[in-house]
Amino acid sequence: MSSCVSLIFFSLFMFLRASAQDPTYLGYYCPDKPTYSSNSTYFNNLRTVLSSLYSHNASYSTGFQNATAGEDPDMVTGLFLCRGDVLAEVCRNCVAFVVKDTLDRCPDEENVVLYYDQCMVRYSNRNILSMVDTNGPLVLKNIKNVTSNQKDGFRDLVLSTLNQAAVEAASSSRKFDARKTNWTASQTLYGLVQCTPDLTREDCLSCLQQSINQLSIERIGERVVLPSCSSRYELYLFYNESAAIMKPSPPPPPQLSSTPQPDKGGISTGLVVAIVVAIVVAVLLFVAGYCFLKNVAKKAIHTSYAFNGDNRTTADSLQIDYRSIQTATANFAENNKIGKGGFGEVYKGILLDGTEVAVKKLAKSSGQGEAEFKNEVVLVAKLQHKNLVKILGFSLEGEERVLVYEYVPNKSLDYVLFDPTKQGHLDWTLRYNIIGGVARGILYLHQDSRLTIIHRDLKASNILLDSDMNPKIADFGMARIFGLDQTQQKTNRIVGTYGYMSPEYAMHGQYSMKSDVYSFGVLVLEIISGKRNSSLYPTDGTHNFVSYAWRLWTNGTPLDLVDPFIVDNCQSNEVIRCIHISLLCIQEDPVDRPTLSNIVLMLTSNTVTLPVPRKPGMFFQSRPENDPLNSVDDASITDLYPR
Ligand SMILES: *[C@@H]1O[C@H](CO)[C@@H](O)[C@H](O)[C@H]1NC(C)=O
Ligand SMILES: *[C@@H]1O[C@H](CO)[C@@H](O)[C@H](O)[C@H]1NC(C)=O
Ligand SMILES: *[C@@H]1O[C@H](CO)[C@@H](O)[C@H](O)[C@H]1NC(C)=O
Ligand SMILES: *[C@@H]1O[C@H](CO)[C@@H](O)[C@H](O)[C@H]1NC(C)=O
Ligand SMILES: *[C@@H]1O[C@H](CO)[C@@H](O)[C@H](O)[C@H]1NC(C)=O
Ligand SMILES: *[C@@H]1O[C@H](CO)[C@@H](O)[C@H](O)[C@H]1NC(C)=O
């Protein structure tokens, strides 16, 4: 009977094989024990599992299915996972191919993972469901190196893109995310991450973390494929963009895939379609209604704010004619571009009266209405402090929205701090002054202004330096101006930057003043060391920036962290106190981190005793350079050529 089934199954397969394009083979992972013999119960169970993975009722449209057969000790658990953007038909063909291929490639092996570009198939004598497995990484690399002068920037971009993708993927029910971001004017970076959807959010994140950490990011494209998840980036579009965005999520209960319906000819396809359509329509109506109500609520809140203003800053006094902005920036000429942030590009401009300004042209994805936008700008423009960049006005024309800021001449801190030819200009006194100024600026945002503003993206490139090298924080209030939800302490839209993000923000989207405190701690360590938090710490291969600083601290050698340019000329007690404070800021538990008012106090008063810092919290880490590519043997490292 069962041989009859498998005969039908394999002939069906042969037919399909002839008609479909073969999927691209990547590699396999089969530890060579235990093995089965061909007349064993295990083999029979395996055949049952494989045939149910390749059956007409398998869930190719959601791209994931599991199956089990038999009982211990001969139980077989199997699954397939198709890449999140492949169409159901391609998924089906891939699974069909692999199900056959596995018996050729890994004959007699009980534990097998077979990787193809479009899908993967896995089975085992153990229960593999809902468990993270990161063994046997398959590492594939483009042959082209990143040019060395672009390495740091490229690395930051890849990590922040994949990090954000990982956070999104882990929170989604499909456990998949693909995204792109501009690298240079002509090059786009594409990233894709995916977990098997049987994993929890935390497990998926932890798997992706391990996958991403194994990318060396020395090549222009790489991927690390693990049994439970994979990550990949390239400078060309390697996935189906429209399908990646459009593919429906499996229905709400994020439990496991679908419980297979018995195929007793009961439910017709038509009925299924009707039910699905009804559900989709209901969900859409619900979402539309929700958004509508939420907008109404939001508008009400904002309107009431608008009349609270008591000084003379009004939308009218801040609005600037769009044409004069166009003139000031030579119509946003490329050579006037001075920066680029998460919310848009920044241009230098000179107004007709000779005032130099920085003009931020907001990216178009803001969903805010015009009135709401004006309201928010007015509120944020009222925040005035000598350590904040001043908003001079705004301008709009149709969809285009720009913010006009005072022009701060000495560029941003990262420009000076991380450049070996310039960092000598920043002696300890200047650096100490910058640390204090940034702390006071954030304190004002958090506590001393009438609005409580959480910056969410504090980093060296958001600290501008005026002609006396005083720091001015840029990009505050952007979440408000851009219309991201302020009423919740939790967000799906991650605004921050890799390396500065606190673990709870990166992993759970929870932001608070304490996430700014974490970023501040990382920034202070950068200011002291003169190194980017993404730099590599090759000392012993296991440390990233934060854990390196922590190790020096626990070893009693914190001064080893200090930038060689300033180490001979600094007040070591001040430096050590600053390192101590920054370690307090980056502690894992947000509750343990000091508030900004405490930080300012600690910085200004030597008589305040500091608590003993606990271990820092870390999220995605960069893999230090000379950490051997784990246990990957040469055979599994393949060079793929770019298309
Ligand atoms: C499988 O076949 C071998 C000989 O070919 C035999 O010794 C063994 O007992 C068989 N095992 C089972 C489970 O039938
Ligand atoms: C599919 O249908 C077959 C019977 O046609 C059934 O045995 C199997 O459990 C169903 N589900 C899956 C996932 O294969
Ligand atoms: C898939 O896994 C879930 C959870 O372990 C289980 O409840 C379900 O029965 C499995 N499906 C199949 C077809 O084995
Ligand atoms: C890429 O860089 C590595 C060192 O980082 C070097 O050994 C290798 O030869 C380079 N490959 C190419 C193709 O330039
Ligand atoms: C990326 O580059 C394209 C083409 O140069 C441009 O249209 C687009 O606005 C840019 N996107 C961002 C977010 O900068
Ligand atoms: C990409 O996806 C779209 C929409 O899902 C589909 O129509 C198109 O055929 C796909 N393209 C390829 C090359 O598979």
Image (spheres, rainbow, N blue to C red):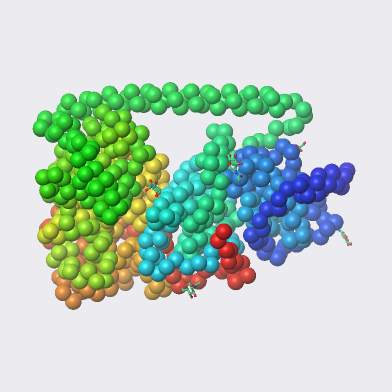
* Residue positioned 17% across, 56% down in the render: 409
Which one is in front, 130 or 121?
Answer: 121
* Residue positioned 78% across, 49% down in the render: 18
Residue 211 can be seen, yes or no? no
How far from the left and from the top, in percent, is residue 329?
A: 23, 47
How far from the left and from the top, in percent, is residue 430?
A: 15, 64
Residue 4 can be seen, yes or no? yes
- Judge left or right: residue 554 versus residue 277: left
Q: Eyeballing the image, is 71 above or below 252?
A: below
- How many discs appear? 0
How far from the left and from the top, in percent, is residue 65?
A: 65, 43
- Judge left or right: residue 215 versus residue 592: right
What residue occupies the far bottom of the structure in this picture?
Answer: 568
- Judge left or right: residue 124 versus residue 221: right
Looking at the rendering, which quadrant does residue 643 occupy? Answer: bottom right
* Residue positioned 17% across, 53% down in the render: 408
* Residue positioned 70% across, 40% down in the render: 58
Q: Eyeballing the image, is 298 above or below 142?
A: above
Which one is in front, 211 or 161?
Answer: 161
Looking at the rendering, which quadrant does residue 368 occupy? Answer: top left
Q: Quadrant of the N terminus?
A: top right
Which one is in front, 638 or 290?
Answer: 638
